[in-house]
Amino acid sequence: MFLSRMFNAIQLSPQSKTMVELLDLNEKTKKHGLVLTPDDVKTVIISRNKVLRDHGRIELGIEVTKELVEVFSTSPYMDQDHYVDTLNELHEIFYYLRNETEDKIGDMKLIHMMKDVFDGPCAGSLELLRSKMEEFAENFRRDMMRRESLFEGDE
Amino acid sequence: MELDNTQDGSRSVSNIYVDRSQLKRSQYVMSLLQEGQRVGLINSREAYRIQAGIIEVLQQLIRRYTQGESTSVTSETAEGIMVSLMYAMDAYALHFMEPEEAIAHLKSENVKTMHAKGVELLRQYFEDAKQLYQDVKKMKLDVPVDAYNMTIDESLPVFMNNYNIIFEAHNTMASIDYPLAIDDMRLQGVFYIKQYLERLQLETRFCHFFSHQDLMYVLTNFGKICRFDYRIELFNIFELMMNNAVFSLLSGGDVNQVRISENQYNRLNRMLTACHADQRAAVIHEAVDRLQEALQTDQALTRYMDLCRDELIQRVNNATENGSLERLVIREKEEREKPMVLMLNENERMSDVQMRKLVDRIMESDNTAKKVRLIRDHFASLHDYLDLLNSGCLFGDEYHALFATFEDIELAIFAKIVFYEEMRGDVRDFPDIVADGAEAASEWETHYIAFMQQLDDERIAAIGRLIDDIDYEEISFY
């Protein structure tokens, strides 16, 4: 618990690195009509911290948050009205997937996979994305167990 | 490691004292930081710098752990890596003779360097442990003691092959069953394994002072005295050998003797009973000294035997006062001819397919008498019977009906299995053991115990006599 507090608690003053870096992303996302205000950034970070705590994870930086913003801003299904809520939900799905795939898939690969499914079969539906990702995690774990039992058989 | 090496538990460096009793072997650096701050050897700014340094190394290790693929890990993983990091830091701090010296290094060196040096030390200890393991393997005793053999042949290689110095240095990895005479279970990781191997090597070297026949003599008679199958029990071989060597000396035997005659035992019993506890301690002390001298034990073994000596004194005092000396002194137990040697041949077992077919037929049958007949006609091997009983194809009264067709000898064999724990090392008679019951591990055992309990006393006694006639060693239960 003490590690979680130490790593996941992020300073959110207007001058903090996190705030500046996330607001800087607006330069890239505004061409897609997506902008985060300082208050939005606070909401996203507070929600991210809660997700990390709920999923029992230690996060070293905000690279994942930045990547989610950048990658998903190019989706045709993102709109300014639901921007913050969508980002919060994407964090939730991402860290759920990290746990369920037992850290066997890298961050970037996972984010891009989520984006492909979100834009493709889910047509921008977060509920569908969640259920597709749950399905994926289940299959992934099953395959992993099968591979492990094959290895055990070799011994 | 002995931290408290001065009389008042403190030592001064530049007039500042560190209280050794406040230091913890398992969290050495943390306790140094706390104690260092308490006595004023470390100020709060320095403590903060060290802690921040530790967190920085932790971050680097986590990135290394995820191989740059991810910036997050589960809390358990992070905590595990943190413990491993501190374990390496402890290794570094512990290699200084004095805690003040360690504190001076904590203050002057950067954490990353100290961690790297700690890892290097762990690597050396691991290499030492590997070498020790090779030595122990070479001198391994030829004894049919499962825990001893499995520990050397299977468990220790698990450690040697899987120990992870960076991310799980604190993890002992292997489950070590064979108990040492004296073991420090507070240690973890390579510190534990290294110490375990050092002691196992000393113990094995001691056992090699005696002939193989003498070793087997002690083991088999120990099993008989305790009424258990010594091959599957957890006990320390060295301790038995050392104790008996001391008893032999005390009762007029030669130095490298472990065999004790009835006369010697009686003499020993008389002498120890007549003594006061202090006198007993003195004679055992002297006998151990003589043993060490005669066997020309080196410094390490001598010191280890000294540690065991105190344990032996305690045991002898307890046994003498409780009148249970005959269970401590291993001597030849009259070898009564076992009239029954069971031939339980693996080849007599039926194939899995046959077994499944029969179990299906038994399940389908709706008549108890028919079920029992099917079983009695087709089952012969003990292993098959155990498979059948564990398959759960019988219900309630059907168990009773099956057991009712068993001869005494068959019931006796099952008693060896069901009442094993109760009969091992127990002084009660078999009828008392049956009456008191046992903890059943499965449904059939519950029914078996109930069945036995309703038999008449005479039959139970007859079964009990048969149990004594069955040679344990001929039965491989599973």
Image (spheres, rainbow, N blue to C red):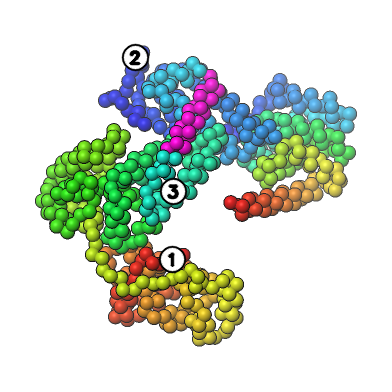
Please name the residue that numbered disc 2 is placed on: B15
Residues rendered magenta in the picture: B110-132
Of residues A71 and B422, the one drawn nearer to the viewer in this rendering: B422
Cα separation between marks 3 and 2? 49 Å
Question: Which of disc 2 and disc 3 is earlier in sequence?
Answer: 2
Of residues B178 and A38, the one drawn nearer to the viewer in this rendering: B178
Question: Which of disc 1 and disc 3 is earlier in sequence?
Answer: 3
Please name the residue that numbered disc 3 is placed on: B151
Mark 2 Cα within 10 Å, few/some/many (few <14, many 20+)?
few
Mark 1: amino acid = Phe
Q: Main secondary structure of the magenta part?
A: helix
Q: Residue B11 placed where, x, y %?
A: 32, 20
Q: Chain of mark 2?
A: B
**Residue B347 appearing in the image:** yes
Please name the residue that numbered disc 1 is placed on: B477
Residue B391 falls left or right of residue A90: left
Q: Chain of mark 1?
A: B
